[in-house]
Amino acid sequence: MIRVEVSLRGGLADRLPGGRTTLELPAGSRADGILGQLGLPDVHCIVVVNGAAMARTTELHDGDRVLLYPPMAGGMEVIARARGRR
């Protein structure tokens, strides 16, 4: 099992008390598993793990900090820049 800190931002924040929680997940869990566990499997969002924009399929590790942002205008440009594809 791994423990990850999860913060929901923007319009997603009201889905959790205080917009944050700590989850215990099976080893090998991916970021999209968090969305499923929170009852948000089809929500489109930007996934940030330990300060870096990542794919929803990113494998998580014990102690990771995950932030989930709803997309906004210009959001894809931010992701592309973070991945060096500007």
Image (cartoon, helix red, strand yellow):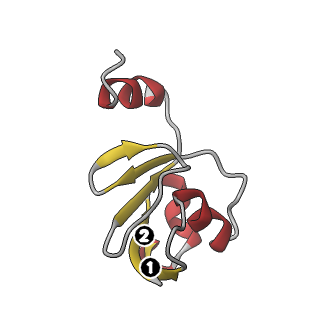
Q: Amino acid at mark 1?
A: Thr
Between discs 1 and 2, the one toward the N terminus: 2
Q: What's the residue at 57%, 67% (across, down)? A: 34
Circle 2 is placed at which residue position?
A: 6
Q: Is residue 26 above or below residue 33?
A: below
Q: Amino acid at mark 2?
A: Val
Q: What's the distance in space between the residues labelled 1 and 2, CA to CA?
A: 5 Å
Circle 1 is placed at which residue position?
A: 21
Q: Residues within 10 Å of mark 1 (few under 14, many from 20)?
A: few
CB contact under 8 Å: marks 1 and 2: yes
Q: Is residue 81 left or right of residue 79?
A: left
Q: What's the residue at 49%, 64% (across, down)? A: 13
Q: What SS does tag 2 mark?
A: strand
Q: Residues within 10 Å of mark 2 (few under 14, many from 20)?
A: many
Q: What's the residue at 58%, 70% (across, down)? A: 15
Residue 1, x across and y down, in percent: 47, 84
